[in-house]
Amino acid sequence: MNQNILEMKHIRKEFPGVVALDDVDFSVTAGEIHALVGENGAGKSTLMKILSGVYPGGTYKGEVVINDAVKIFESIKDSEEAGVVVIYQELALIKYMNVGENIFLGNEILNKKGLIDWDTTFLRAKEALDKVGLPINPAIKVINLGIGTQQLVEIAKAIAKKTRILVLDEPTSALTETEIEHLMNLLQTFKESGITCIFISHKLKEVFQIADRITVLVDGKTKGTYNKTDLTEDKLISLMVGRELTQRFPESKRKPENIAKNEVAFEIKNWTVYDPEIDNKIALNNINLSVRKGEILGVAGLMGAGRTELMLSILGVWGKKSSGEVLLFGNPVVTRTPADVIKAGINYLSEDRKGSGIVLIQNVRNNMALPSLYSRLKNGLIDQDAELTAVEKMIQSLRIKTPSVEQLVEKLSGGNQQKVALGKWLLTNPKVIILDEPTRGIDVGAKYEIYTIMQSLAESGIAIIMISSELPEILGMSDRILVMHEGTIAGEVLRAEATQEKIITYATGGK
């Protein structure tokens, strides 16, 4: 029987007013791929921050044992010297530095004069890149790489540190299917070479594909550790959320024949946009789409197909418009700036929740009130009573779990952060809302709550455009589906006729 390479015993971590981890036990066998799962707020990231030295010794109770030796890490550097490297969902690369510089950042290779030995740096960087199957020049700047390639650079960076325990936190959230498959094969290769992997993901299909064992955390406590072969997806969901989820998507009360009779709320006609970085390159070519009141229109396609770029171009923040118009209930909409579009009643929820959707260091109240401040002005001043009433009502409506409106948003779980981001737009009373990857990085229980909110919004008459890379989500939530391929609409599929095969065929340029 293999020996445990890692044991975390009786871990307890408290924040002011909150017990994040309560007597957690977690052990990993040498050379295995071990999945760590749980709802947002279950304590997964907190546990890994203890392992990685982000929370130093003395700030928690319990023991961290690596290869039978008790470790007290005072910094990330300490944990890396013990062979532990964590790759977070938000990649920690310096985009204006080159790949070689990033790989050895903080561990620079010096010559006898104390200067950086660039020849050796690039040689060893190339060796690390080769190990992750990435045939690129280490002198290229990170900003010129796609997200999938950047993810592999992060892993190459870890490999260069002689990692023994590699932790990957939501590593596939922004990857294409091909990139995900490459990553899965890479993890199997690491396993065969003796590297131990801890895999954190809300995508249960990937957990069952790659993991040997699975540990479940619930509300900061260890629910249990299970062999993959002893579980099903439904059983694992039940363990995570504490209840049976008999269906992944809420049933719609809206009938297709009724939706088809509704008024067209939003239209894009003959929309053509040039790439802002490449002269004379058409990025979006003659796009036409419409969505009716109370309809959920799904927009599918591979990464790079132009889905997000289309929506950002409508907001006036991406590309150089060549032709086309946006209509709201038949009336032209000015699209020079986001303020123009928002004022008209069209809102966009960014796929980058933490970067563009919310202000992490501000409280719930400020985040939710920000876009609709002007609607509560009285004699040129903000009516704070009206603001508080509106925010509290929205918190109750969306069932946001927060101790108070003054809680910093960064302290909330991912699912509740997403609800705050959504709630701020709902306070503007939108007619159309564009949701870009609305459930990225949140757990299955929180996903169901977001889906329920979406159905409720559609039932109230709001037109919804949903961009999603998850085919089950597209199929389960959309009334109608548009598929994009290389900056064009490649096909349209009604919900009743939709299959994964049809969507993939259109997304890859097929007919």
Image (tube, grey):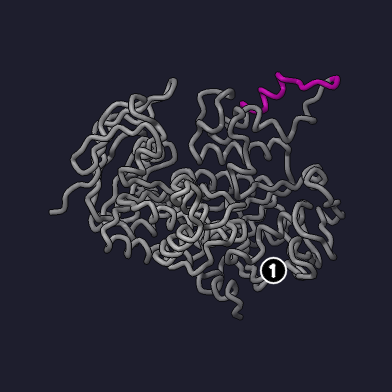
* Residue 126: image location, x then y, percent: 45, 64
Q: Eyeballing the image, is 209 above or below 400?
A: below
In magenta segment, residue 393? no
- Foreground: 390 or 366? 366
Name of the residue lying farthest toward the bottom = 511
x, y percentage for residue 310?
A: 71, 60
Which region of the structure is painted magenta? 379-392
Residue sitting at the far front: 113
Residue drawn at the location 55% of the way across and 53% of the way down: 252
- Outermost residue on the left side: it is 1
Against 439, is 417 above or below?
above
Answer with left or right where residue 18 lies relative to residue 315.
left
Instruction: Identify the amino acid type marked 1.
Output: Gly
Q: Quadrant of the N terminus?
A: bottom left
Label 1 crowd bin: few (<14), some (14–19), many (20+), radius 10 Å: many
Type of secondary structure dominating the magenta stretch: helix
**Image point (16%, 49%), residue name:** 3
Q: Nearer the viewer, residue 25 or 5?
A: 5
Q: Secondary structure at mark 1?
A: loop
Describe residue 183's horizontal placement relative to residue 505 as left or right.
left
Task: Measuring from the top left, give residue 443's x and y in whole percent.
Answer: 45, 46
Quadrant where the C terminus is found in the figure: bottom right
- 25 relative to 40 in the view: left or right: left
Q: Is residue 388 magenta?
A: yes
Residue drawn at point x = 58 percent, y = 62 percent? 140
Q: How many marks?
A: 1
**What percent of the width, then of the height, locates residue 422?**
62, 41
**Residue sitting nearer the eye, 309 or 107:** 107
Does residue 182 show up?
A: no
Would you name the residue on which mark 1 appears?
487
Whether residue 175 is visible to the viewer of this picture, yes or no, is yes
